Image (spheres, grey):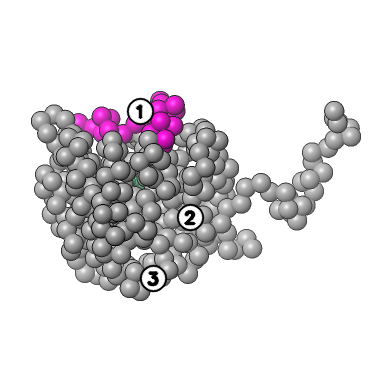
């Protein structure tokens, strides 16, 4: 065994070139996906209060935003929509002229190479704010699957590149895969929100997306934050149903789940660095309590080191700029 004094681990930390050479985890703009909120109306660029730097964008402002994203070398965006109206079945989610469907067309026409990933869920579109059809005091799993399938199809028809079912209904990946395959969209991959936990870190997003449940909570469909083994079963289930990419969400309190999934599965893994994780950093940075750039890059690197190939983050544009300045 080689030990001190023969071994000196500090030798490999002598200067930046050597440190760069042996760095195990690389973080690049090409690992990131940027979430965007789109809304009906014209000339709207409304700040989302708890998420400084994030806006509700009307379609006329969307182009400038996605151009910036593409110019920064970020490969894709994840779209969320604010519908014109909400109803019990979330009908705008699967309307061919819904806000997401229109946004997809705008982006694909202007920047065909930017990946457009769409979240398939109902919570922004239902008046009760749940992710599925409410049946008495339950969320009706199987009836909801049909609406997810319709939503996914309408996104694919509008030109979406990747479909991301996020409602945590059992069988949602299979339902979406079947619908896509039956309609000649066999080539469209599914990024499954596989291990999505019932997290308080979604708080700022629910303000941004106006999607908080009007009663009850999401604990009968989203996962218990305490369950790591169950998270692996969720991921396995989605893989068995045909998921191409599996996602773990949130990221920071679930790095162990990412690491265990990395060991067990060979599918590409995405981690969603969610709204509350972003807001915490923004609030501390606004107070000058932390160095936002260094803290953010350290956290994003940590998510990658845990095993995520892809990081979905509201910090994507900031991070891409910071990384550019460093090279
Ligand atoms: C929709 C959805 C949510 C998020 C992504 N898709 C909210 C939720 O499940 O309540 C959260 C994203 C974030 O907090 O950044 N189901």
251 within the magenta span: no
From the image, state whether disc 2 or disc 3 is nearer to you: 3
Disc 1 versus disc 2: distance between alpha carbons?
27 Å
Q: Position of residue 47 (x, y in %)?
A: 31, 57
Q: What element carries label 2?
A: strand
Q: Is residue 200 visible?
A: yes
Label 3: which secondary element: loop
* Residue 27 left/right relative to 3: left
Q: Give the range drawn in magenta.
A: 216-236
Among the 4 quarters of the image, the one containing residue 104: bottom left
The tag earlier along the polypeptide, 3 or 1, is: 3
Q: Label 3: which residue?
A: 112
Looking at the rendering, which quadrant does residue 201 occupy? top left
Label 2 to label 3: alpha-carbon separation:
18 Å
Which residue reaches farthest bottom? 110
Q: Which mark is residue 103?
A: none
Mark 1 or mark 2, which has the lower sequence index? 2
> Are the residues tagged 3 and 1 within 8 Å (C-beta)?
no
In-image side of 143 versus 243 (left or right) = left
> Mark 1 packing: few (<14 Cα in 10 Å), some, or many (20+)?
some
Q: Is residue 266 left or right of residue 215?
A: right
- Work out whether residue 314 or residue 266 is closer to the camera in this orientation and state it: 266
- In this rendered view, identify the residue nearer to me: 207 or 302: 302
- Eye-nearest disc, 3 or 1: 3
Residue 325 horizontal/vertical position (percent): 59, 63
Task: Using residue 97 as the reference point, say whether residue 208 is left or right of it.
Answer: right
Q: Does the magenta stretch include residue 218?
A: yes
Residue occupied by mark 1: 224
From mark 3 to mark 1, how far is it between C-alphas? Answer: 39 Å
Q: Which residue is denoted by mark 2 in the rendering?
A: 32
Q: Are marks 1 and 2 in contact (CB under 8 Å)?
A: no
* Label 1 lies in ligand 1 vicinity (Cβ under 8 Å): no
């Amino acid at each position: 065994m080689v030990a001190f004094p023969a071994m000196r681990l500090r030798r490999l930390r002598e200067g930046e070139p050597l440190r760069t050479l042996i760095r195990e985890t690389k973080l690049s703009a090409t690992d990131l996906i940027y979430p965007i909120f789109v809304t009906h109306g014209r000339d709207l660029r409304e700040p989302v209060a708890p998420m400084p730097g994030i806006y509700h964008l009307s379609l006329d402002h969307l182009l400038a935003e996605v151009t910036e994203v593409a110019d920064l070398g970020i490969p894709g965006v994840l779209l969320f929509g604010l519908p014109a109206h909400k109803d019990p079945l979330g009908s705008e989610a699967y309307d061919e002229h819904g806000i997401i469907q229109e946004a997809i067309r705008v982006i694909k026409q202007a920047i065909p190479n930017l990946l457009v990933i769409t979240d398939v869920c109902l919570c922004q579109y239902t008046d009760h704010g749940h992710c599925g059809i409410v049946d008495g005091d339950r969320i009706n799993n199987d009836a909801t699957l049909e609406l997810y399938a319709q939503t996914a199809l309408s996104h694919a028809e509008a030109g979406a590149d990747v479909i991301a079912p996020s409602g945590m209904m059992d069988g949602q990946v299979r339902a979406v895969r079947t619908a896509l395959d039956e309609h000649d969209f066999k080539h469209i991959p599914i990024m499954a929100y596989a291990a999505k936990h019932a997290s308080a870190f979604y708080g700022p997003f629910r303000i941004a997306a106006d999607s908080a449940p009007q009663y009850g909570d999401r604990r009968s469909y989203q996962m218990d934050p305490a369950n790591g083994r169950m998270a692996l079963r969720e991921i396995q289930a989605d893989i068995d149903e045909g998921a191409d990419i599996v996602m773990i969400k949130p990221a920071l309190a679930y790095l162990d789940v990412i690491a265990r999934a990395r060991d067990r599965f060979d599918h590409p893994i995405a981690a969603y660095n969610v709204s509350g994780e972003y807001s915490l950093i923004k609030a501390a940075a606004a107070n000058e309590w932390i160095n936002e750039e260094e803290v953010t890059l350290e956290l994003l690197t940590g998510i990658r080191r845990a095993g995520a190939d892809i990081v979905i983050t509201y910090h994507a544009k900031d991070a891409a700029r910071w990384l550019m300045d460093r090279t």
